[in-house]
Amino acid sequence: MHPVIFQFGAFKLPAYGLMVACGYLAAILYVFNKARAAGFDKEKLSDLVFYTVISGMLGAKFFYAVTYWEEFGPDTASRLVFLFRSFQYGFVFYGGLVFGAAAFFLAARRGGIPPLKAADLFAPALALGHAFGRVGCFLAGCCHGRPTSCPVSVTFTDPASEVNPLYLGVPLHPAQLYEAAGNIAIFLALHYGLKRSLAGRLRPGALLAAYAALYSALRFSLEFLRGDDRGGLLLGLSPAQLISLAVMAAALVFLKAKK
């Protein structure tokens, strides 16, 4: 695809970084647009966004490092050098979700913001921003699908892309676009749900739990179509699938629990 949007001298504008930035911007604009209707002060939400985004990025990188540490080089020094040199790529979404969520709830409590009510406001924005990020993955070639002969396929030919070199020139499932479309569908469902939540027809935390359940189901299913390295398997399932099952179970328990 197009891992680099344009290059001027030594400066490169990576497609993935650009789309992730657009995703953050879209998510933040959505939250601020709905803030007044939800009864939140934009200034307090700004602090909440800042701590959540920074923690989420660090968490996503940390999970990536832990998952693929042995593949970065022969020793600790070379692995650390590789990790910093490739900082613009290599993030694990669930790592970002865990660290970002922890920072979100801590910052919300510290700022006197009802955490579950705020989380419901952020849930649609999270799905929206993630959709942009997956388009960035598609342009960069990371998180790619496995080989397929179905009519819906994409062939990566640029050696600079993040696709496994063995799959260059091979038709692959556009897993990144599948997930982007799924996230847009989740966003639309949660956007509709937010209207009900603001009207008091949903209990606090319901939209967050719905997001967790829907995204976990989407991710669990799409993992079967992924062709990149998925980490070590347990019972035939990737780490992301095992996390998806745990998150989905917790979300369903919350949704079924009485008020």
Image: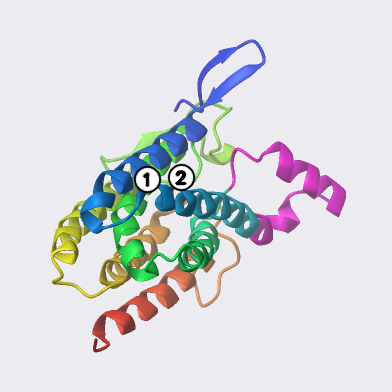
Residue at image coords 41%, 52%? 45
Q: Position of residue 123 (x, y in %)?
A: 32, 58
What is the spatial separation of the Cα atoms under label 1 and label 2, in whole angstroms?
19 Å
Residue at image coords 31%, 67%? 117
Residue 31 visible in the snapshot: yes
* Residue bounds of the magenta highlight: 65-90
Q: Is residue 7 left or right of residue 72?
A: left
The residue carrying mark 1 is 129
Closest to the observer: 211 or 238?
A: 211
Instruction: Tell me the mark number nearer the camera, choosing from 1 and 2.
Output: 1
Question: Circle 1 sits in a helix, a strand or a loop, which is it?
Answer: helix
How crowded pointer 2 is (Cα within 10 Å; few <14, some 14-19, many 20+) is rated as many
Does 29 sit above or below residue 215? above
Residue at image coords 56%, 49%? 54
- Mark 2: amino acid: His
Closest to the observer: 115 or 136?
A: 115
Question: Circle 2 sits in a helix, a strand or a loop, which is it?
Answer: loop
**Which label was assigned to residue 144?**
2
Q: Earlier in the sequence, mark 1 or mark 2?
A: 1
Residue at image coords 35%, 52%? 41
Q: Is residue 151 left or right of residue 219?
A: left
- Quadrant housing the C terminus: bottom left
